[in-house]
Amino acid sequence: MNLKGQKVLVTGGNGFLGRCVVSRLREKGAITVTPRSTEADLRDAAACTRVVQGVDAIIHLAAKVGGIGLNREKPGELFYDNILMGVNLLEAARVAGVAKVVTAGTICAYPKFTPVPFKEEALWDGYPEETNAPYGVAKKALLVMSEAYRQQYGMNATFVLPVNLYGPGDNFDPASSHVIPALVKKIHDAKALRLSRLVCWGDGSPTREFLYVEDAADGLVAALEKLETSDPVNLGSSEEISIKSLVELIARLMGYDGAIEWDATKPNGQPRRKLDVSRAERLLGWHAQVGFEEGLRRTIDWYDAHPLPVVPPTW
């Protein structure tokens, strides 16, 4: 798809990832449509019917999402909201004859004990990690819908699986943030309060892979331009790091030298996460550009300039 002059609906286009995607699309000459949730609640089928009118393509990013804490607190909402938004949007796009849809899935869709590196073929080899299974299964259902709609209706529906994202402008609210922004805020507050120790969830042993937000945006736009299959495609950095090493790295970059303690009564989440991105390289000509430490520096610098109020710890 040549994006110049194409009208592209980006759901979640005013969010963390969405802003970067919209910027990339505009650089390529696309006309972007970015309704806010207050203007179009995608859980409402009528709202989806309205927002897809006259658009040539869709990148579906809108999601209700958060870290382990939110997944444990609101699993029903996470399942219901995410599956309903996606189902309503894909059906509305089909009826309206939208030329192409790219849906962003989640690494949480993979089985809890997936062989590393995660290959797309392993998606159905087991149940997701329990703390984020409702969210992961809701997103994975949209992959099934994309494949079914391509088969029955010839709809050009595609599905990509970004790994955990991070970067400037992320969500740093500790009630709903993911691990990197949560740690950046926690260490920022510990420094401000002159705390001599820091307590983190779990035992630090799980590993994670992270993708800089601008790299993810490039991958999604490449999928809109080039991907012509409903087979899922991983987007990742191919760098794996333990949570323990991650905490130590962020503490070093932020100049925090207090003791780091682990609360093993809290969940670890999935044991390992690292993607095989060879399919993205082959089909999209895409690979991550921003090194992890450089991306963390940019994220920390952004938060230092836009800090949230300091909150004393509850441990």
Image (spheres, rainbow, N blue to C red):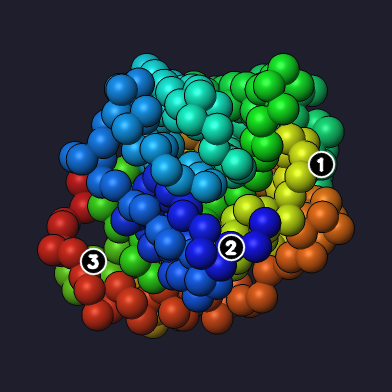
Decide which of tag 1 and tag 3 comes sooner along the chain: 1
Position of the N terminus by quadrant = bottom right
Q: Which residue is mark 1?
A: 119
Residue 278, percent from left and from top:
84, 55
- Taking 79 as reference, is 276 left or right? right
Quadrant location of residue 53?
top left
Label 2 vs label 3, nearer the camera: 2
Q: Position of residue 183 (x, y in %)?
A: 39, 60
Above-or-below relation of 35 to 290: above
| Residue 94 in sight | yes
39 is higher (above) or lower (below) than 93:
below
Helix, strand or loop at mark 3: helix
Q: Is 60 placed above or below 189 here?
A: above
Q: Earlier in the sequence, mark 1 or mark 2?
A: 2
Give the amino acid type for the residue marked by disc 3 in the picture: Asp
Compute the Cα span from label 1 to label 2: 29 Å
Q: CA distance from mark 1 to mark 3?
A: 38 Å
Residue for point 28% across, 78% down: 304
Q: Residue at x 68, y 37 (%)?
A: 156
Q: Marks 1 and 3: CB-CB under 8 Å? A: no
Q: Residues within 10 Å of mark 3 (few under 14, many from 20)?
A: some
Residue at image location 35% in from the left, 21% down from the top? 45
Mark 1 is on which residue type?
A: Lys
Return the mark for residue 3: 2
Secondary structure beneath dot 1 equals loop
Q: Are marks 1 and 2 in contact (CB under 8 Å)?
A: no
Residue occupying image coordinates x 37% and y 47%: 12
